[in-house]
Amino acid sequence: MILRAAALLTLLASPVLGQSDPAMAAMGAVRILDESAQALSEAKGGRERVKALTEIVRGYESGLAALRDGLRGASLTEAQLAEDLRARETEISQLLGVLQSMTRAPAPATLLHPSGPTGTARAGMLLADVTPGLKAKADALRADLEEVQALRLLQQQAEIKLEEGLTGAQQARTALSKAVADRTDLPRRFVEDPIQTAILIAATETLEGFASGLSQIAVDEAPGSLPDISHRRGNLPLPVQGQLLRRAGEADAAGVRRPGVLIATGPQAVVTTPSAATVRYAGPLLNYGLVTILEPQADTLFVFAGLDATYGKIGQVLPAGDPVGLMGGTLQTDVSLSGDGAGNARPETLYIEVREHNQPVDPAEWFRIDKG
């Protein structure tokens, strides 16, 4: 199962996801979805089940996103070709008429000219000059028509694969949720005091105030912390597959500025911990929705807000890459031609804030963030 998941990760890192040719992108995406489906069928039990299922879910996410991009590109290319053919309709009709008349005319008739042998010779020379041009135009027209037909067939096949992929992705998420719920082998640094948690939530009005009181909800906390990960600053992977919408300090539509970054994600995307970390809190908080707060090292907190479901219990120590939640939204089979990668394709948003000694720092100092 782990070998299959590793093969899937190799596919995710391969160039197929970056193909500019919509047909190649779609075929590469289909290959990733097929690998994900195979990996899911082989995902049985064992200690590594959660990790393998997390990779499989991400494989489905990447495959579906690439397939949508390929379908969108194919649709746009087909529409452009069809519009071009419609614009050249008169020219094409004239070309076809000339080609048909040349085909139907007897060979001797095409070689005779009313003005005699000289005219016939001149006409032959003109015909010799014109014929290659007519043939080139006919070949170009044939190529355009064949491309339109191929793109339409590709779209029909890819739409079927898209539906299959959505079903497989949902099955993988269900299996992941069950695997997380059944897991009992994670170490715990402390046990949550639910009364103190409720008091802390009721008494605080800001994320800063809540973060400063997190130690109050811990009972029997083990001394020490996780290893220092300062050497990994700037190289941690983002916890979710997506694109940067807003950097730290940038104003939103309402003019509100926050010290964290906003990442656009696909519906029901899995969110993972970028390093081994303790779950300091998981649940609803203020106006942030469902929130998971991780402590990867002493006096450092990673805040992930805007989740639809959270995984992991307060006090547990999660290994790197472990799922901490899922984004919301509904998986759709339709493909919008206006999607730009951060709109229709990724309608959900995850807010990421990093706090050191309870002071916010730019998440770009810790995570590999770019707009590409």
Image (cartoon, helix red, strand yellow):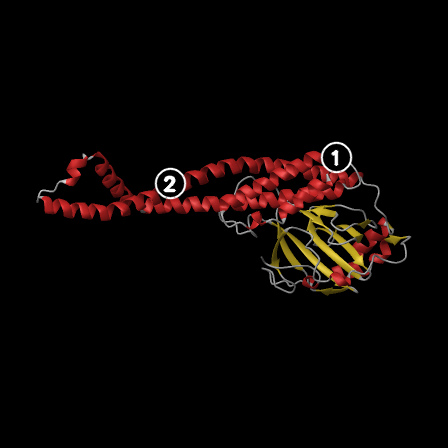
Q: Which element type, helix, strand or loop, lies under badge 1?
A: loop
| Label 2 environment density (alpha carbons within 10 Å; few <14, some 14–19, many ≥20) | some
Query: What is the residue that sits farthest to the left in this orientation?
Result: 115
Kindly tell me whether residue 205 is visible in this rendering. Answer: no
Quadrant location, the N terminus: top right
Q: Report if the CB atoms under discs 1 and 2 are less than 8 Å apart.
A: no
Residue occupying the point 60% across, 43% down? 63
| Label 1 environment density (alpha carbons within 10 Å; few <14, some 14–19, many ≥20) | few
Q: Which residue is mark 1?
A: 44
Q: Which residue is mark 2?
A: 145
Say if 217 sits above or below 50 in the image: below
Q: Which element type, helix, strand or loop, lies under badge 2?
A: helix
Figure quadrant of residue 221? bottom right
Q: Nearer the viewer, residue 103 or 226?
A: 103
Kindly tell me whether residue 140 is visible in this rendering. Answer: yes
Residue occupying the point 90% across, 54% down? 222
Coordinates of residue 231 in the picture (x, y in percent): 76, 63
Q: CA distance from mark 1 to mark 2?
A: 48 Å
Q: Type of residue at label 1?
A: Lys
Left or right of residue 28: residue 81: left
Left or right of residue 146: residue 204: right
Coordinates of residue 64 in the picture (x, y in percent): 59, 43
Coordinates of residue 323 in the picture (x, y in percent): 73, 47
Q: Nearer the viewer, residue 329 or 168?
A: 168
Mark 1 or mark 2, earlier in chain: 1
Coordinates of residue 300 in the picture (x, y in percent): 78, 61
Q: Type of residue at label 2?
A: Leu
Figure quadrant of residue 61? top right
Figure quadrant of residue 98? top left
Quadrant location, the C terminus: bottom right
